[in-house]
Every structure is written in C-alpha cells, then in structure tokens.
Image (cartoon, rainbow, N blue to C red):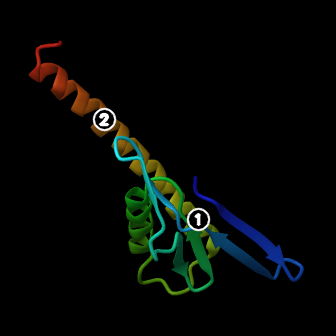
C-alpha cells in the first residue's frame, strides 16, 4: 500500500508532502522492495505530484502532463492538476479499451465467440 501525505503549514503558505518508497509486485511474484526512487515528482516550479498505483502508469501520466505544458514557465497549480487529471482519465480509458479489445482478440483466436 502506498502512503502519500500532504499537510499545510505556516497558515497555508506552505505545503509539506511525504510518500513511502515501497513498491509491490503482485501475483505470481508477491514481492515488496524499496528502491531509491521517489514517488514524489516535480511538476512545476511550485508544484509536485505524489504517485500511487502502477508506477509505470503513473510515470507515463505525469510525463504526458509535463509535455503538455513544457514550454510554459509559470503554470498555475490548478492548471497542472487539471492536465494531470485529464491524462489519468485518458490513460484509464486507454487501458480499458486495450483490455476489452485484447479479450475480444483472445476469444476470436480460440473460437470462443
């Protein structure tokens, strides 16, 4: 389980964030390890993102979000959040489509449909 925590301090002027480093590989391996990789990603001059879930998917979502505003120096935090959220939704839809079409191909290959 990933732990990501954010707390405001100094009357809301600053935010402190922390995240664990544990990565879990599910069945059939069922392995946990703690590499020297942070789950906290720099998104802008004054913003970070904390990733949870499939680390490859999170990395791709954040990479695509950063690419969207790459040449714009002073992105607002709400704009960065909206871009990242849009990329996350797009990624989820893409994975569902791949899962569905992959299953359809499997069914057709084995004559199940």
Circles 2 and 1: CB atoms closer than 8 Å: no
Marks 2/1: CA–CA distance: 27 Å
* Residue 16 drawn above or below residue 112: below
34 left or right, relative to 14: left
Q: How many numbered discs? A: 2
Give how far across and how far down residue 101 sits, in percent: 24, 32
Query: Tag 1, which secondary structure?
Result: helix
Viewport quadrant of the C terminus:
top left
Viewer-side residue, 45 vs 3: 3
Residue 57 horizontal/vertical position (percent) = 40, 56
Q: Residue furthest right?
A: 11
Q: Which residue is mark 2?
A: 99
Left or right, 79 with reference to 54: right
- Return the mark for residue 100: none
Give the labeled residue for mark 1: 81
Which residue sits at x=49%, y=55%?
Answer: 86
Quarter where residue 3 is shown: bottom right
Label 2 residue SS:
helix
Q: Residues within 10 Å of mark 2 (few under 14, many from 20)?
A: few
Q: Residues within 10 Å of mark 1 (few under 14, many from 20)?
A: some
Residue 81: image location, x then y, percent: 58, 65
- Residue placed at 44% from the left, 73% from the top? 66
Sequence-wise first label, 2 or 1: 1
113 in relation to 99, above or below? above
| Apparent side of residue 30 relative to residue 38 in the rendered image (left or right) | left
Coordinates of residue 24 in the picture (x, y in percent): 46, 54
Q: Nearer the viewer, residue 67 or 48?
A: 48
- Between circles 2 and 1, the one closer to the viewer is 2
* Placement of 106 over or under 67, stated as above or below: above
**Quadrant hosting residue 77:** bottom right
């Amino acid at each position: 389980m990933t732990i990501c925590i954010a707390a405001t301090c100094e009357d809301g002027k600053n935010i402190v964030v922390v995240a664990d480093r544990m990565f879990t590989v599910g069945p059939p391996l069922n392995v946990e390890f703690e590499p020297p990789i942070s789950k906290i990603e720099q998104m802008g001059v004054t913003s970070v993102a904390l990733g949870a879930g499939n680390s490859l998917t999170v990395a791709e979502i954040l990479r695509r979000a950063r690419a969207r505003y790459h040449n714009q120096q002073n992105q607002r935090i709400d704009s960065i959040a909206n871009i990242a959220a849009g990329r996350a939704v797009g990624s989820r839809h893409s994975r569902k489509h791949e899962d569905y079409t992959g299953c359809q191909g499997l069914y057709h290959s084995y004559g199940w449909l």
